[in-house]
Image: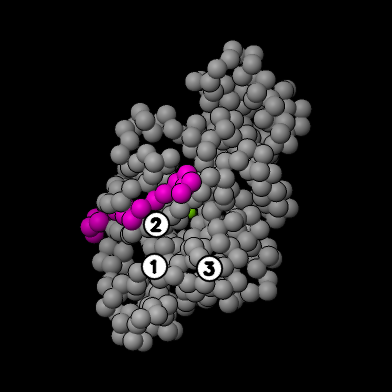
Amino acid sequence: ADSLLSVKNLSIDFGTPRGALHALRGVELEVPKGRIMGLVGESGCGKSTLAFSLAGLLPSNGRVAGGAILLNGEDVTKMSERELRDIRGRRVSMIFQDPMTALNPVATIGRQMLDIQYRDAGGKAEKRRRAAEMLDRVGIPDAAAQLAAYPHQFSGGMRQRVCIAMALLTKPDLLIADEPTTALDATLEVQIIELLRELQQEMGCAIVFVSHHLGTVAELCDDVTVMYAGEMVERGTVRDVFHNPAHPYTQALLECDPARIKDATRQLPTIPGTLPDLVRVPPGCIFRNRCEHAWERCATEHPPHYAASGPRHVASCHLLDKEGTA
Ligand code: SF4
Ligand code: MG
């Protein structure tokens, strides 16, 4: 009902020399106001593509092949470049794995933070004050003086804090975080996750948090969406999905270290087998060549999102078909 972000049946193709690569197919995502959604899956599962598409950012060979991305009821996929620029940094902000992606190396932090506020009320002094306040809030020591500094003068962890300050400066409804702690050591990672949680509670923004680190997702997120080979295979609360995984792929991810999920296990476990060819997407279940439960039905019929354990818990696996003749 009070969904801030609602992704409906989203499909995204990439042009390749071999033909269209179907990077995302039929993805559904619901993020209510103020909740934190984790997006997990192996590299190549489409989680970053999905995250970037939420801000209207696709590589030049990418296109929306179907579906909708509704942000407060407005379809991001139908917006002009100008409308997109307008929502980015205002209603939607992003932080990235590499903070330098978001920073201009030849402009001071203060200059960049003034630019972000170009449409906000108030004079220059007022905007500088707001920028310094935000830097202070994310834990930059001597914040007012740091407005004159350039990005390279900060360490990696401090640079990510600067990016978080910049991303939240205009109080967006939605923060998209694409593996923001992957490049940091474990101590800094814990600090940044703690900071994000505090800021989320203070500011009430929703967060889509992309990660291949299950422990971090368990720590930070309310809900989780598990992606595999361009599809959403399972979705629910962190409690439902991590304690009662319904999809064999999620089960395989968790099986490797159920008790150690909160450990600093930085990589997802490796599951035998390879990802299917997404130029020629095979019929049936996308996971079947790696699934130990696969049977004939899985080769011909694509599994819909079946209800699983909790009220909002769904998974795409025929094993959950109560009416089925398995
Ligand atoms: Fe395995 Fe079949 Fe379920 Fe796919 S639908 S995950 S192949 S049991
Ligand atoms: Mg990625």
Q: Secondary structure at mark 3?
A: loop
Question: What is the three-letter code of the residue carrying label 3?
Answer: Gly
Secondary structure at numbered mark 2: strand
Residue 28's tag is: 2
Q: Which residues are magenta?
A: 1-20
Q: What kind of residue is marked 1?
A: His
How is colour applied across the structure in the image? one colour
Residue 283 x, y percent position in the rendering: 27, 73
Residue behind mark 3: 310
Point 45% across, 34% down: residue: 88
Other residues around mark 3 within 10 Å, as few (<14) / some (14–19) / many (≥20): few
Quarter occupied by residue 9: bottom left
Which mark identifies residue 305? 1
Q: Is residue 14 in view?
A: no
The amino acid beneath tag 2 is Glu
Local SS, label 1: loop
Asked whether the viewer can see residue 225, the reply is: yes
Q: Quadrant of residue 72?
A: top left
Q: CA distance from mark 2 to mark 3?
A: 17 Å
326 lies above or below 168: below
Residue 321, percent from left and from top: 38, 78
Q: Are marks 1 and 2 in contact (CB under 8 Å)?
A: yes
Q: Residue 185, how many percent across, how many down? A: 68, 53
Left-right relation of 133 to 43:
right
Q: Residue furthest front?
A: 1
Judged by depth in the image, the label closer to the viewer, 1 or 3, is: 3
Q: Position of residue 124 (x, y in %)?
A: 60, 14
